[in-house]
Image (cartoon, coloured by chain):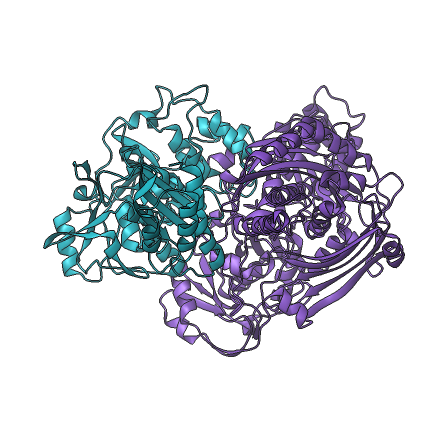
Chain colours: A cyan, B purple
Amino acid sequence: MEPDTVIVNGAPRPLAAAAHTTALDWLRGQGLTGAKEGCAEGECGACTVLLARPGADTPTEWTALNSCLLPAAALDGQEVVTAEGLGSPEALHPVQHEMAVRGGSQCGYCTPGFVCSMAAEYYRPDRVQLNGSNGFDEHALSGNLCRCTGYRPILDAARALGHPGLDDSLAARRHQPPPPPPRAQRGLQEVLRLLADEPDALVTAGCTDTGVEANLRGARPALLVPVDRVPELRELRATPEYVEVGAALTLSEIERRLGGAVPLLEQVLPQFASRPIRNAATIGGNLATASPIGDLAPALLALDATVVLVSLDGDREVPLTAYFTGYRQTVRRPGELVRAVRIPLPLARTTAFHKIAKRRFDDISSVAVGFALDIEDGVVARAAIGLGGVAATPVRATATEAALTGQPWTDETVRAAAAVLATEGTPMDDHRASAAYRSAMLGQSLHRLHAEVVA
Amino acid sequence: MSVGTPLPHESAALHVTGAALFTDDLVGRTSAVLHGHPVQAPHAHARIARLDPAPAYDVPGVVRVLTGADVPGVNDAGVRHDEPLFPDEVMFHGQAVCWVLAESLEAARLGAAAVEVEYEPLPAIVSLRDAIAAESFQGNRLLLESGDVEAGFAAAAHVFEGETEMAGQEHFYLETQASLAHVDESGQVFVQCSTQHPTETQEIVAHVLGLHSHDVTVQCLRMGGGFGGKEMQPHGYAAVAALGATLTGRPVRVRLTRAQDVTMTGKRHGFHATWKVGFDADGRLLALESTLTSDGGWSLDLSEPVLSRALCHLDNAYWIPNVRAAGRVARTHKTSQTAFRGFGGPQGMLVIEDVLGRCAPLLGIEAAELRRRNFYADGQATPYGQPVRHPERVARAWEQVTESGELARRTAEVAAFNESSPHRKRGLAITPVKFGISFNFTSFNQAGALVLVYKDGSVLINHGGTEMGQGLHTKMLQVAASTLGLPLDKVRLAPTRTDKVPNTSATAASSGTDLNGAAVKDACEQILERLAGVPGETWEARVHRAYLDRIQLFAAGYYKTDGLHWDPAAMRGNPFKYFAYGVAASEVEVDGFTGSYVVRRVDIVQDVGDSLSPLVDLGQVEGGFVQGTGWLTLEDLRWDERDGRLATSSASTYKLPSLSEMPEVFNVALLENATETGSVYGSKAVGEPPLMLALSVREALRQAAAAFGPPGTSVELASPATPEAVFWAVERARERSLSWTG
């Protein structure tokens, strides 16, 4: 590989981009105008392209990503496929064919992005035919918005897809090793030294936050340190005491690799943003940005998780309850990096995640509640409840936990504890929800859990 | 016969491969382009005390700052002369006060940040309620009267009064406003623009530049969605680009970011309505008195015609013998609200459906029965005096939905489910749509086309309509091919340009196909007439023979809709060529813990006449329905009333329907045996009417919320009916239940 080269649609192109140029703008500057800017914050998916990334089932997977969030520099040494590379008007790719003939495009502006998301799912190695279905997971399209069609023909196109043929070069590519990380991606020690030397350096992994800051708020950090391919941050391991999830694992990777090992996370992850965002966003990034809502945090709080911070001085383990210190602030010191998240074992037997949002897919929670309860012989032996969206940081509902612990799992207990839960936190009125609704949702969530979980 | 064949969109293969070009895709193909960036005001209302562009010129790459002093013509972006392009007084938060042109968008952004502006903030009115209280209105007041309202109320067995409020809607076309202008080799100002109304864009560009219309050409390749948001809104941005191009001699691109687009461009009007309604003992509507107030924003834009259409759709499909409906446009310090699919029709219809949905339990009549009982019958006329033709089509569509949707069985199932389910309740509602087709402004109901037949027999179609995804070009190709008796591949369509077909109307009011299709057909028929009797085995041979015989092989087609008249002062006349009808039944399930819900099933029958292009029409029905559902349930415009800032100005805060909002079962059928005489190939308009079928979802949500209360619960439901709004409706119903059982 030559320096600063990107393989785009099978052919190498020199990557010479101005600083702060997005992958989307770079591609469009190359004359590949199929990918569009619809929102510049990874919400609409019109910019979706495919990147060859390390896979779970095959060495390489075609991964749908929002090119508006990625810096062009992140393409260094990578392989990209755009709608133009999947097929041409004279020789449509199967995904393009189904979309075209079924009326899957009207204005056509969102269409190349849909085609790329659909192609990623088409090439998903573990997509299997089941009971007459082609195994297409419609969540693959949760990060693409269409304002024209009402989605029915798009979904029909997805459901009509077969499987790639033997002569499909993109399918074959999956069985070869993935491209190496961009050269800027150093080993952990090198990253830590850099962070120690450059206090203003901004760490980024999937760029789902830094990309939005750059595009919508004009943030232009002097030094951006990407860590999403740092090997030491990408480990997933289980000991008898805990499950440790590497900070730079993407949420999609965690979904795939964790399987059902942590049922509460298995509930959260499909509700977290959209597939292209989960393909980029990492668990470490989610905790480092310290959003007061952050769907993972309420769940991880309920799981009694800890954060492993690493610096040149070594590891430091902090309980998540002590990690958040204020609005988007944490105990993380300059020079420190989130290395991993630890989830202690054994897990509570009853867990649930309630996300309250306007839209079912790809929305930010108004309120998020993570429950982890042990109910023994009809009595609540242990209760941990994490809340998002009701305070400046994600918090534990400690008063509610106290009201539940040691009490029988009955209507009376739940009614009393729900009244306590409704007063936890300090919810605000904003464009997502009123404070009154947020408080009501806290109380309702315990009633709902009780309705669903019989002692 | 190409017409009537279910064909994919004519650009489908280009769409799916990324080969279809949109306005901003041309930037990379144009050299030395300058990029425009606005300076947006941080106040809802303020006087500009000082504007100093000088610091912007210190930013590397900045070439020119455009201010009001640069305008050689008229400093106005509208047709009413109430929308200064470069204002002295800021009228809404985010209004552009000047524009910076630079070598890169980044330099333009930094240049815009460097411009120094001093504002003197002035008092602002942000909410519609505040505007009503302050009597802040603009434009003409409208009054629609028929019958004798007082006598109607006097005769009524039941009289109810209420208020209804509904939010607006952001268009959120996926392609934001985009223009690319340059002065071409002939000295003409050439503007590529994503516009539904190229002629008006041309006129505004000309008047801003102090030129004549023949000095300016506007081309629209295609739009990435329009929905009415590109009927008036593109003009000012096109004018900025054109002004920059004339002043710098370089191509200028103005493409709004999403945040700029949402904070600067107009939206669907929010409305407030007060109403008083009278029914006879059988639940028949006797009288309706109502005052509609629309939130027009800072300038008039299209607010008056939108209001007029709202008043003309207050009846929906129901005969109301005595009506007095007043309308007024509030002036608020917000974006200037504008056309949006339905153009006031949805707001008017929401009011009457809200009235019926709330009154049905009070009358003790099932909502579906109350609606059916009030349908128009033959011989009846609307409150504005237009006879309702084909009213039986509503009843036919209603019966078809009732049967194919198995409503009798499912209504019983819903009742049984609700009986046994304490925490989740279902609702199943059926609503009709009657929507008038034609521009209320009679002059707009004309169109032109230019059809060129070349010596080799190939055909090039030009017409005045624009393509925004609705499939107009597909239909125009079908009309031309069918009329000429040619296969589709003989016919090609050229991008819409003002120098091919002049003085065109906006592609709006669902009228694109009716008007332009008839004009294309007229041009083709002229050519066929001239070819009659020309010998030749094949089309190509006849065309070649005709050329040799010096027969004109091109024709300008023209069409105007006959029989329309409208007196806007009296609000009476025959404004519509016909009515498009439709019926939808929607079933929802509401979660009582959260107010969240799913749309379980939707059945629709839509009257499109004889469909020109069934796949295209199906797409319009489904897409319109989901977009309407978005307006009524999910899309939540929130303005910060303290400073007038739009709090939901991005895709992460303003949520449109995603795949998850699609009904789980979605059956759409086109009404059969529905030929519309006198329109192109017997077809009917389809762009707007299906949007209002989504009112069935809102009514189903109301019924599901009511099921949490005792029988006879009348539910007031906010619009949009977000999960939060539904939750509060459920809570109120549950409270009634407590007091009822207690």
Q: Residue at x 67, y 66 (%)?
A: B330
- Residue B147 visible in this rendered orientation of the protein: yes
Q: In the figure, B501 relative to A345: above or below?
A: below
Nearer-the-camera pick, A30 or A309: A309
Residue sitting at x 29%, y 32%: A259
Where on the picture, by quarter, is residue B372? top right
Question: In the rendered image, which quarter contains the C terminus of chain A?
Answer: top left
Instruction: Point out residue B629 in the picture as x, y percentages from the top left corner.
Output: 59, 44
Residue B162: percent from left, percent from top: 71, 57
Looking at the image, residue B608 lies above or below residue A447: above
Quadrant position of residue B410 = top right
Q: Is residue B28 above or below residue A166?
A: below
Q: Position of residue B443 (x, y in %)?
A: 78, 53
Return the residue found at the far left.
A313
Q: A438 or A74: which is nearer to us?
A: A438
**Horizontal placement of A199 versus B533: left or right?**
left
Left or right: where B47 falls relative to B515: left
